[in-house]
C-alpha cells in the first residue's frame, strides 16, 4: 500500500507541520495531537509504524510534498478545498473549523473593522491567507505571510504585525499559554479538515476513510475529540 520513497510497507510516513496544537505539536522527540492520534489509529489498522516527516505547511497544502513521494499522508489540520481535492486525494471530513482574529494584548483592534492601514499576519498557503487576501480591500489592511504559527506569534509580540487571521482552534490553544496574545473575534468560515494522500493512492484513501468511519462509530473519535478539543 505504501508508495512513498521515504518508507517501506512497514512504515506510514506522515507529513506534518508544527506547532499546530491541538492537532499537532512536538513534546520532546514525540509528535502529539488529535491528528497524530488519528494517524496512530490508521497505522494500527495497516499494521504499520508511524514515521513523522516535518515539512513546511505550504508544501503539504499544495500537494507538492505528497506527490513528490516525501510521505504517504498529510496530517496538518488541512482544510478540504476544491483546489486541494484536485491536487491530492482528500479524505472525508473529521473536524469542523473556523478562523479567528488575534492581536497583541492591549491592542486597540477589536474586530476586522479596525484593521484599516494595518499589517495582518497569515500562514503561507493556508485558508486564513486566502480569507485575508479576499477581504483585504474591504477592510484596508495589508497581508503579510509567515511560514509558521510560531513566526506569526513572534511577529505579533514584536509588533512587526498588528493582527493575525488563522484557524480558531489553534489560536484558542495558543492564547491560553501566551498571555501577550488575545483572541478578539471569531470569523465563521465553516471549514472542514481532511487528511491528504498522494493523488492516485485510492487504496490508502479508502483505508483513511474506513478508519474514520470506524472511529466515528465505535466512540474512539469522540474520545479523542474530548481529549484534544474538549467541550
Ligand atoms: N486549516 C488551515 C488550512 O488548511 C490551516 C492549517 C495549518 O496551518 N496547519 O489552510
Image (spheres, helix red, strand yellow):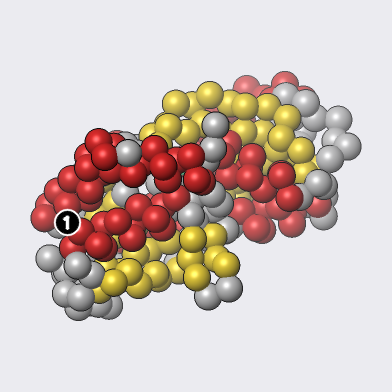
Q: Which residue is at a point 82% across and 55% down the rendered structure image?
A: 158
Q: Which residue is at a point 53% across and 75% down the rendered structure image?
A: 29
Position of 98 with respect to 211 (left or right) is right
**Disc count in the image?**
1
Position of 53 with respect to 121 (left or right) is left
Q: Which residue is at a point 39% across and 55% down the rendered structure image?
A: 37
Q: Is residue 98 visible?
A: yes
Taking depth in this image into account, of 45 and 59 the one nearest to the observer is: 45
Q: Which residue is mark 1?
A: 204
x and y percentages locating residue 60 in the rendered image: 38, 58
Position of 126 with respect to 152 (left or right) is left
x and y percentages locating residue 124 in the rendered image: 53, 52
Quarter assignment of residue 2 = bottom left
Q: On the rendered image, what quadrant is the N terminus found in?
A: bottom left
x and y percentages locating residue 86 in the rendered image: 23, 44
Taking depth in this image into account, of 178 and 71 the one nearest to the observer is: 178
Q: On the rendered image, what quadrant is the C terminus found in?
A: top right
Q: Which residue is at a point 48% across and 65% down the rendered structure image?
A: 31
Q: Secondary structure at mark 1?
A: helix
Q: Is residue 162 visible?
A: no
x and y percentages locating residue 90 in the rendered image: 26, 45
Taking depth in this image into account, of 203 and 221 the one nearest to the observer is: 221
Quarter assignment of residue 83 = top left
Position of 11 with respect to 230 (left or right) is left
Amino acid at each position: 500500500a505504501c508508495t512513498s520513497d521515504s518508507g517501506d510497507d512497514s512504515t506510514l510516513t506522515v507529513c506534518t507541520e508544527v506547532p499546530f496544537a491541538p492537532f499537532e505539536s512536538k513534546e520532546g522527540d514525540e509528535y502529539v495531537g488529535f491528528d497524530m492520534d488519528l494517524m496512530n489509529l490508521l497505522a494500527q489498522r495497516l499494521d504499520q509504524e508511524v514515521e513523522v516527516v516535518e515539512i513546511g505547511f505550504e508544501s503539504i497544502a499544495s500537494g507538492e510534498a505528497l506527490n513528490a513521494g516525501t510521505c504517504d499522508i498529510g496530517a496538518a489540520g488541512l482544510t478540504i478545498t476544491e483546489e486541494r481535492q484536485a491536487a491530492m486525494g482528500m479524505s472525508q471530513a473529521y473536524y469542523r473549523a473556523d478562523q479567528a482574529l488575534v492581536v497583541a494584548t492591549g491592542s486597540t483592534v477589536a474586530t476586522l473593522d479596525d484593521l484599516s492601514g494595518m499589517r495582518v499576519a497569515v500562514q503561507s498557503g493556508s485558508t486564513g491567507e486566502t480569507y485575508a487576501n479576499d477581504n483585504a480591500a474591504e477592510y484596508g489592511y495589508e497581508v503579510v505571510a509567515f511560514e509558521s504559527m510560531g513566526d506569526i506569534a513572534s511577529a505579533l509580540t514584536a509588533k512587526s504585525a498588528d493582527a493575525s487571521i488563522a484557524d480558531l482552534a489553534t489560536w484558542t490553544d495558543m492564547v491560553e499559554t501566551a498571555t501577550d496574545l488575545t483572541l478578539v473575534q471569531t470569523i465563521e468560515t465553516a471549514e472542514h479538515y481532511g487528511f491528504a494522500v498522494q493523488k492516485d493512492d485510492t487504496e490508502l484513501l479508502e483505508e483513511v476513510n474506513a478508519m474514520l468511519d470506524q472511529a466515528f462509530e465505535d466512540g474512539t473519535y469522540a474520545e479523542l475529540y474530548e481529549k484534544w478539543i474538549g467541550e
